[in-house]
Amino acid sequence: MRASDAYVARITGAKDLTAAQAFCIRLAADRRGDFTIARRFAPRRLAPHFCVLYAFARIARDIVEDPEHEGSRQAALLDWQRQLRGLGREAAIHPVFAALEQTVSEFNLPTGLFED
């Protein structure tokens, strides 16, 4: 999956958690082997959450580093931040944020951790 394809992905249902988590798992599996190895050592029940966290961070990194985002980098990062800050208050439009909302809620994670 190209970096720009991952960023522009959208969900059809505001709370389609199964599809959102599947998107994150596919994105994690589509990337370099380093994450696959790390995920292998995670407890089975936590693996989907690891994929969600990885997908969030990977897309943010891709926005910053990939040439495909040249010229739109700042706008894309501001959009990514806006979606993050909308967790729990706005309907998610990107599958990563639909899945991340569940992970943040389940583990009581402060969203400020994701802004650095």
Image (spheres, rainbow, N blue to C red):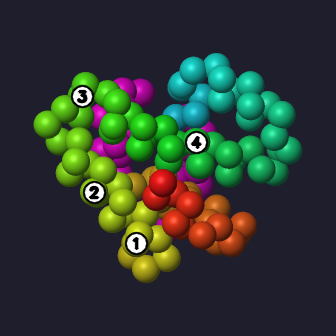
Which structural element holds mark 3? helix
Mark nearer the N terminus (4 vs 3): 4
Q: Nearer the viewer, residue 104 or 113?
A: 113
Give the mark, 1 or 2, whose residue is nearer the N terminus: 2
Hey, which quadrant is residue 33 in on the image?
Answer: top right
Question: How far apart in space, not on screen, are marks 2 and 3 (Cα)?
Answer: 16 Å
* Distance from Cα at disc 1 to Cα at disc 2: 12 Å
Residue underneath mark 4: 54
Residue occupying image coordinates x 17% and y 42%: 72
Q: Which mark is residue 86?
A: 1
Q: CA distance from mark 4 to mark 3?
A: 20 Å
Given contact means CB atoms under 8 Å apart, are the residues at marks 4 and 2 in contact? no
Few, some or many C-alpha atoms within 10 Å of disc 1 (few <14, some 14-19, many ≥20)? some
- Which marked residue is nearer to the observer: mark 1 or mark 2? 2
Q: Which residue is mark 2?
A: 78
Q: Residue at x 50, y 48 (%)?
A: 56
- Which numbered disc, 2 or 3, marks the residue that appears first in the sequence? 3
Label 4 and label 2: CA atoms lie apart by 19 Å
In the drawing, does residue 100 fall left or right of residue 72?
right
Q: Which residues are magenta?
A: 1-26
Q: Which residue is mark 3?
A: 68
Q: Amino acid at mark 1?
A: Gly
Residue type (three-letter) at the residue carrying disc 2: Leu
Please tell me which of labels 4 and 2 falls first in the chain. Answer: 4
User: Percent from the top left, x then y, of residue 105?
Assistant: 64, 71
Crowding at mark 2 (Cα within 10 Å: few <14, some 14-19, many 20+): few
The image quadrant of residue 109 is bottom right
Residue at the front extreme, as displayed = 116
